[in-house]
Amino acid sequence: MPLNINFWISLVWSVICLYWIITSLRLKPVARMESFATRLLQWSLLCVVVILMFSQRPLPAFFEQQVVPRSTLASLFGIAVAGAGAMIALAARRQLGGNWSASVTIKQGHELVSSGPYGLVRHPIYFGLIVAALGTAIAFGQMRDWIALPIWVAAFRIKQLKEEQMLVETFGDKYREYRRVVRSAMIPLLL
């Protein structure tokens, strides 16, 4: 029986989505939120990513090119990488607790979380989701997936920069010191 890549990748992303939905029921109230324009830009980029990576609709031939040769080994590796990324994102999401939000916000009683995965990278949820997207690109292996990946990173980079601005405004020197100690924003040793 052949490996059902769509099933396993869908399972990884479904677990992430389900966890996000369940845990979003216990969030702190919002004190301050990013602008609508910034949210619109981020969500627009993520919609492009979802269409490229997960749409079953055929795209022009260039996007459909297979850039990672189809093989059971490549598929299993991609699924494993996607699963590892999901685990990183879920652990980070759990660590953040009620401070989390889909949009860049400061919550009432917001706490600066710097332990667990936040002691290794300042935005481990973004890192985990980027790793999961990388695994998805490896598993599916089409040009469309590899085009989606830098768009995904760009969307998170925009969000990360806005989030850090709000965290500096809220926590001042405490956040600056955290940023000095934990040098990597989203991708360990890189960004």
Image (cartoon, grey):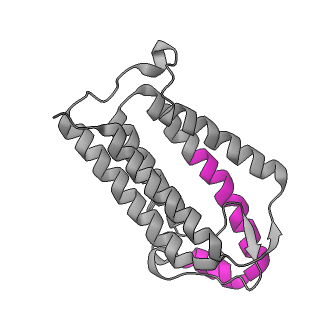
Q: Nearer the viewer, residue 112 or 58?
A: 58
- Whole-percent x, y for residue 181 in the image: 53, 78
| Residue sitting farthest toward the top | 61
Residue at x 26%, y 27% (from the top left corner)? 69
Closest to the observer, 169 or 98? 98
Q: Position of residue 140 (x, y in %)?
A: 36, 34
Residue reaching furthest to the left: 1
Q: Is residue 54 above or below residue 66?
A: below
Rendered-image quadrant of the N terminus: top left
Q: Residue at x 58, y 78 (%)?
A: 97
Residue 164 forms part of the magenta stretch: yes
**Is 154 inside the magenta-drawn segment?**
yes
Image quadrant in which you'd find residue 163 = bottom right
Q: Position of residue 161 (x, y in %)?
A: 68, 59
Check the image and report above or below for 162 versus 11: below
Q: How many marks?
A: 0
Question: Could you tell me residue 42's position as x and y percent?
Answer: 69, 47
Q: Which residues are magenta?
A: 153-181
55 left or right, relative to 164 = left
Visible residue check, residue 186: no
Q: Main secondary structure of the magenta part?
A: helix
Q: Depth check: 121 or 105 in front?
A: 105
Q: Residue at x 39, y 52 (%)?
A: 12
Residue at x 34%, y 42% (from the top left corner): 7
Question: Residue 112: in sight, yes or no?
Answer: yes
Horizontally, is 152 left or right of 190 in the view? Answer: right
State whether residue 11 is above or below residue 114. above
